[in-house]
Amino acid sequence: MADIAPVTPAEKGRLRSVLAMLWADKPAFVAAIFLCVVLVCALIGPALLDAVATKQNLRGRNAPPFDLSKGWLLILGGDALGRPLLARIIVAAQNTIAIAAGAVVASMIVGSALGLVAGYSRGRWAQIIPRLADVIMSFPSLLLAVIVLYMLEPSAANIILVLAITRIPVYLRTTRAEVLEVRERMFVQAARVMGASDARIVFRHILPVVLPTLLTIATLDFAFVMLAESSLSFLGIGIQAPEVTWGLMVAQGRPYLTSAWWLSFWPGLAIILTTLSLNLLSNWLRVALDPQQRWRLEMGGRKNG
């Protein structure tokens, strides 16, 4: 059995510094805690509550919220088939987060790779790749997703593929713009003079400079993709029953808005809070990863400490 490497004092100090900067921004700290709760629900929620979330109970049909006489799982009410909304929201977190994460990671990898080539190259690829981004952006992203999913089976894999394609230009253009500026800096020129290969210059010297910006955009883009998936599910071309996402739960509660508003309200609130938390955390990342602005968080962390 391999020995687990102990945490070094430098790593402990780095982690303590990050936590201090996060604590200095109270809204971002609360957002990070909420996102951790959502992530835990997405990871272990289906294993614990999948049977409860799918079990029908017609006696609890459209049960109102905050009525603990029928059990704590019905604290948020029941849906049209008597299934507890709390359990279904926790189980639906896995599909919602998995689809958004898959689309963001795929689009960031592909878009960033193309952006690195387009920004560093001085040949034909520098002209061809940006035109690819223009072609994708010429179609409204949501309309393109609707058309493709109408022709294909609305499965999780197809949804991830479509949403990833629509988000590639965001990372491609951002990476290309960053690389065009970074490649003219002195440290890149020095590496080129010393005989470093193009691949080493791109991945060792340029990518670490561009990566913080990409991570900030990815955090913000995660919220956009999650809203796009919810919109597709609401339109009926996203995830199909018996699978469940927050957007699909909102769509399923639409016929009962006047008599059982909670069917759409609670999953909609989960979408809003998660999106808001991602935006707050993205703003914190933008400051924390910028050496010229990080001192504000570091000063705040020292005062609180």
Image: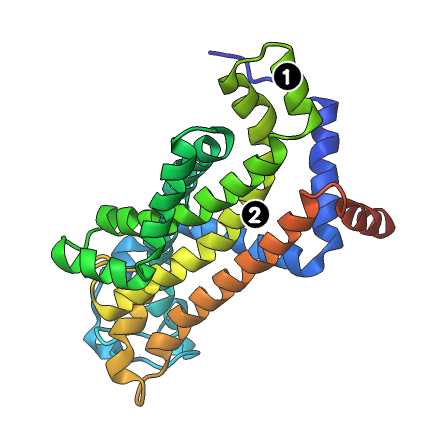
x 53%, y 24%: residue: 203
Mark 2 nearby-residue class (10 Å; few <14, some 14–19, many ≥20): many
Position above or below: 297 against 75: above
x 39%, y 56%: residue: 225
Instruction: Measuring from the top left, give residue 13's x and y in whole percent.
Output: 75, 31
Instruction: Measuring from the top left, give residue 229's x and y in whole percent.
Output: 33, 59
Label 1: state its secondary structure.
helix
x 14%, y 53%: residue: 153
**148 on left or right of 184:** left
Q: CA distance from mark 2 to mark 1?
A: 27 Å
x 44%, y 66%: residue: 270
Q: Looking at the picture, which amino acid does disc 1 mark?
A: Ala
- Residue 3 or 194: which is nearer the viewer? 194
**239 on left or right of 6:** left
Please state the total of marks drawn on the protein image.
2
Instruction: Measuring from the top left, give residue 145's x and y in whole percent.
Output: 26, 58
Position above or below: 61 against 216: below
Sequence-earlier tag: 2 or 1: 1
Residue that carries the numbered disc 1 in the rendered image: 191
Position above or below: 71 against 293: below
Nearest-to-viewer mark from 2 and 1: 1
Q: Looking at the picture, which amino acid does disc 2 mark?
A: Thr
Mark 1 nearby-residue class (10 Å; few <14, some 14–19, many ≥20): some
